[in-house]
Amino acid sequence: MKFIDPHHDLWQHAVGEDGPKPDPDPAPHRLLSLEQWHAVRGHWPAGVPVAIEFPNDADITQLVPDLYRIALVVLDFPKWTDGRAYSQARLLRARHRFQGAIRARGEVLVDMLQLLHRTGFDEAQLRGDQSQEAARRALAFFAEGFYQGDVHEARPVFLRSAAR
């Protein structure tokens, strides 16, 4: 899993003097809100990478027609106890076969990393008081895998061993 430092992130918001631009010009590595994306999707060039910030209370199927154009989806955890973004990530990976990056942002704690990985996240922006070293250790705890299937291996362990 890649850990993101928000001060050195490749993806940047489209902002002007008065805040977010409602209709930003296409440029590589733009991080757009869902509203900005809806405003520009009709004329955004297919070859220009774009990232979308997606709210955790919205229906992820809104992005399905555009997934081939999106390089990164940023899913929000407004509280660490709010797990709707796990479901969104799993749907993007398992049902809609999204191949781009999925980032967790917000109240992202070290304790969440195993489930983030298993549901399809490949990037995390940890909450400021969380340690990246502790996060790396947490990810290594279950290096052998899990009994249940996940987005990386859908079969449970008994089916995997039966196939050998």
Image (cartoon, rainbow, N blue to C red):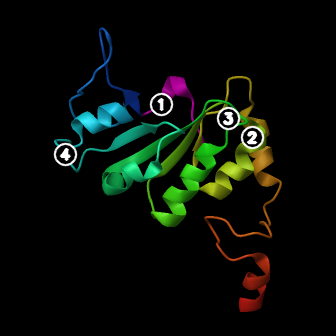
**Secondary structure beneath label 1:** loop
Nearer to us of marks 3 and 2 is 3
Task: Pinpoint residue 23: horizontal percent, then vertical percent.
Answer: 23, 27
Identity of the residue drawn at 42% across and 53% down:
61
Nearer to us of marks 4 and 2 is 4
Q: For residue 45, which numbered disc appears in the image?
A: 4
Task: Pinpoint residue 31: horizontal percent, then vertical percent.
Answer: 38, 33
**Quadrant occupied by the C terminus:** bottom right
Q: For residue 9, which numbered disc appears in the image?
A: 1
Q: For residue 17, which numbered disc appears in the image?
A: none
- Hey, what amino acid is under mark 2? Ala
Give the magenta part as a residue range: 2-10
Identity of the residue drawn at 67% across and 28% down:
127
Is 112 displayed left or right of 57 in the figure? right
* Spatial CA span between label 3 and label 2: 11 Å
For the view shown, which residue lies furthest in the left direction? 43
Tag 3 and tag 1, C-beta contact below 8 Å: no
In the rendered view, would you say 25 is above or below 161?
above
Instruction: Say which quarter of the image contains residue 52.
Output: top left
**Secondary structure beneath label 2:** helix
**Secondary structure beneath label 4:** loop
**Sequence order check: which comes first, mark 4 or mark 1?**
1
- Hey, what amino acid is under mark 3? Val
Q: For residue 108, which numbered disc appears in the image?
A: 3
Identity of the residue drawn at 44% across and 59% down:
98
Magenta region includes residue 153: no
- Report the residue marked by disc 2: 135
**Sequence order check: which comes first, mark 2 or mark 1?**
1
- Hey, what amino acid is under mark 4? Pro
